[in-house]
Amino acid sequence: LQSAMFKGCTPPESQAEHFYSEARRKRVRRIYYGMVAAFDAMVGAYMEAVREAGVENSTVFIITADHGDMAMEHQQHYKMVPYDPSARVPLVIGGGPIQAARLASGAGSGREKVVRAPTQLIDIFPTVLELAGVPRSAWPELDGFSLVPLLVPHAVNERAQLLRLGPRLADCTPDQPACGHRPNFVVSQFHGDNLAMSWYLAREERFKLVVYGTGAEVPPQLFDMEADPGELDDLCGVKHGLHCEMASPAVRQIFRRLEQKIREEVDYPEVSRQVALYNWESFNKWTRTQPGWESILAARSLRWHESWSRNPSGALAAIRHWNATQGAIRACRGTLAAEAGLFPVITS
């Protein structure tokens, strides 16, 4: 709800019927698909230029994006949320060298392969290094893992030969990314002005866990992405009393495994506290040095204006109240209603 408010997805009652209508949702997605088609055409133009230049057999294409975009899933647009339409991005890797290597190795047609293992953007840099034949000894310390083993699933020396990179076995040990020993999960995180607290997610091939703040302010969310790709059935909350620790033993086990995987990558409670303190210090300084800051926050040009305009005095009172907390992370409120001049804090 809070993210929807900040992004302007909570229209006044007079506009709600149109805003949430099926016709509008179809129009939003039609425009989105049109943009995808336009991008696809641009990629095609690049590929055609490579063919015309005669370098198709030595060129690798990597197509991806920095974030997704909500197209009225969960009644939201824009990005910033951990749902898949926002947090998941396309990744297509192909080109002459990879096709030739797959054909030579007998790995399918050499033209396409769908990889369902979780990957992330930090994997692209080591992938480029391996495709370019950069010796592992020359790599900097990296968090990502090369995706080449997923493209050409062979032992490192054979893979290097297929890609015409030269001998590589002596340059690789089992614990190094070039060898293809990658984890079976990825972790993502978001810190920004569109939520009152940070969020973190861990994704395996089937399950996805989202935790917020320090983990204490807002219940986590756990989704079975095979059975529930729309992320509508929160295994932690809707069925099991609002927290994974109160769920069935099977759900509890999945929650603990994925939560531990997030902790292996980032001390999320401490990072969330640091982010909250930084945000508060920045805003507090701005209010102390910016005359008329109250009217600036109420400007019609800001994307939260519709939500703000429902109760301007209550919104301003809530801002002043938060500005006195010195960066404390508070549970998100669960309603648009105002109570006693302040937006209530809902803790359950």
Image (spheres, rainbow, N blue to C red):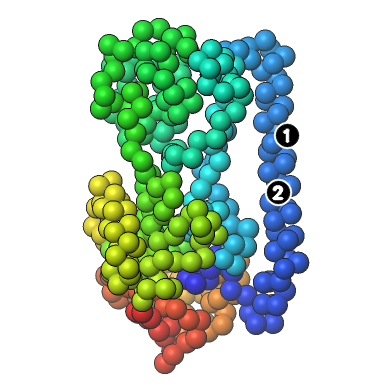
Three-letter residue code for mark 2: Tyr
Three-letter residue code for mark 1: Ala
Question: Which residue is denoted by mark 1 in the rendering?
Answer: 41
Residue 71 visible at all: yes
Give SS at disc 2: helix
Residue depicted at 37% across the width and 13% down the height:
157
Q: Which residue is at the front of the view, 161 or 171? A: 161
Question: In the image, residue 71 lies at what x, y percent?
Answer: 63, 58
Placement of 222 over or under 150, stated as above or below? below
Q: Quadrant of residue 179?
A: top left
Q: Quadrant of residue 291?
A: bottom left
> Is the C terminus in the top left, top right, bottom left or bottom right quadrant?
bottom left
Residue depicted at 50% across the width and 15% down the height:
105
Question: In the image, residue 95 lies at what x, y percent?
Answer: 59, 21
For label 1, count other residues whose C-alpha is less than 10 Å away and answer few (under 14), some (14-19) or many (20+).
few
Give SS at disc 1: helix
In the drawing, what numbered circle is on residue 147? Answer: none
Q: Which residue is at the front of the view, 41 or 224? A: 224
Question: In the image, residue 8 lies at what x, y percent?
Answer: 58, 68
Residue 59 visible at all: no
Placement of 114 over or under 94, stated as above or below? below
Report the side of 75 relative to 212 (left or right).
right
For label 2, count other residues whose C-alpha is less than 10 Å away and answer few (under 14), some (14-19) or many (20+).
few
Q: CA distance from mark 1 to mark 2?
A: 12 Å
In the drawing, what numbered circle is on residue 33? Answer: 2
Residue depicted at 36% across the width and 27% down the height:
180
Among the two numbered marks 1 and 2 on one chain, the one whose residue lies closer to the N terminus: 2
Q: Quadrant of residue 223?
A: bottom left
Disc 1 to disc 2: CB gap under 8 Å: no
Residue depicted at 69% across the width and 16% down the height:
51
Placement of 3 over or under 32, stated as above or below? below
